[in-house]
Amino acid sequence: MPARWRCTIAGALPGAANMERDESLALALLAGTGAPTLRLYRWSPPAVSVGFHQDLARFDAERCAAEGIDLVRRPTGGRAILHAEELTYCVAMETGGHGVMAVYDAISRALVRGLRLFGAETELVRSQPPFPALYRDDASIPCFSSSARHEITWRGRKLVGSAQRRYTTGERDVVLQHGSILTGAAHRRLPEFVRASAGARARLREDLEARTTDLGAIIGTTPDPGELAACVRRGFEEEWGIAFDHQMPEASHVQQED
């Protein structure tokens, strides 16, 4: 891992702005002008983000608009997430020749350490698809009910959902990974914005309720986003042995976005 990193602790931004900022970090690294970065942020208004390969037509844009919820496509893969009560992390870094799962696991270990510092005794475990696809096109299934890989859980329930994308040139191999650290239960409303039968939406919601948790439920109170961000940042520093550049002014290397 590089010795020096940049950390940005951001405010709450609209969905399109958040996705543009995340991708710009990866593209800057690809061009040789950026720095490896951990970005931590929130969303305002709430947003449904749809994976790069998903069909937007399977989501109810009119219902989203009526409730003041953004509908945005992510630059990464994976499946849909409703971003409302969460802290989102983004990591943009050169891969150093490591494969997809090696990078995914390294980031997950740093997140687990940060969450334990916050007081949530999470673990990294191997998960499997929880149930057969409810639709012929399984891209309709929400992220938090469908992943099959190493996941961050608390007492068997999923707490963090992540997605990744690689950017390559002849000289560089860059990864962009971002994901949701759930702080409340609002993500469970995602099935309301999927174009499906009432029965299918109900089953999806039941599955989300059974298989996910959030930090509010774990610690018994509403998490403080600043404290959580500080713990996640420290988790990366301790797990990876990196240092965010303290030689720079605080506002330069840990920026508070408006």
Image: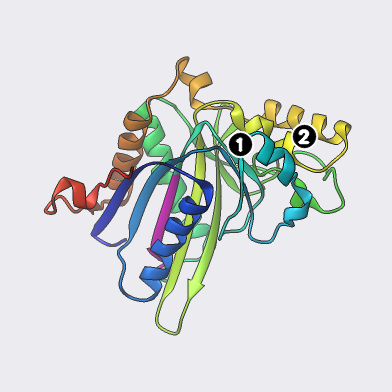
Q: Which residues are magenta?
A: 89-95
Q: Tell me the kind of residue under disc 1.
A: Gly
Q: Nearer the viewer, mark 2 or mark 1?
A: 1
How crowded pointer 2 is (Cα within 10 Å; few <14, some 14-19, many 20+) is rated as: many
Q: Is residue 109 covered in magenta?
A: no
**What's the residue at 25%, 53% (across, down)?**
242
Q: x, y (%) of residue 151?
A: 56, 43
Looking at the image, residue 241 lies above or below residue 157? below
Mark 2 or mark 1, earlier in chain: 1
Asked if labels 1 and 2 touch by Cβ distance under 8 angstroms, the answer is no
As measured in the structure, the alpha-carbon distance from the residue carrying label 2 to the one carrying label 1 is 22 Å
Q: Tell me the kind of residue under disc 2.
A: Leu
How crowded pointer 1 is (Cα within 10 Å; few <14, some 14-19, many 20+) is rated as: few
Single out the residue that lies furthest toward the top.
220
Image position of 89 (left or right of 57): left
User: Mark 1 = which residue?
Assistant: 68
Q: x, y (%) of residue 190?
A: 68, 36
Magenta stretch secondary structure, dominant: strand
Image position of 19 (left or right of 35): right
Q: Nearer the viewer, residue 40 or 177?
A: 40
The quarter holding residue 161 reads: top right
Secondary structure at badge 2 equals helix
| Label placed on residue 204 | 2
Q: Nearer the viewer, residue 194 or 203?
A: 194
Secondary structure at badge 1 equals loop
- Taking the image as drawn, is residue 129 in sight? no
Q: Is residue 93 covered in magenta?
A: yes
**What's the residue at 64%, 39% (across, down)?**
144
Q: x, y (%) of residue 110?
A: 39, 45
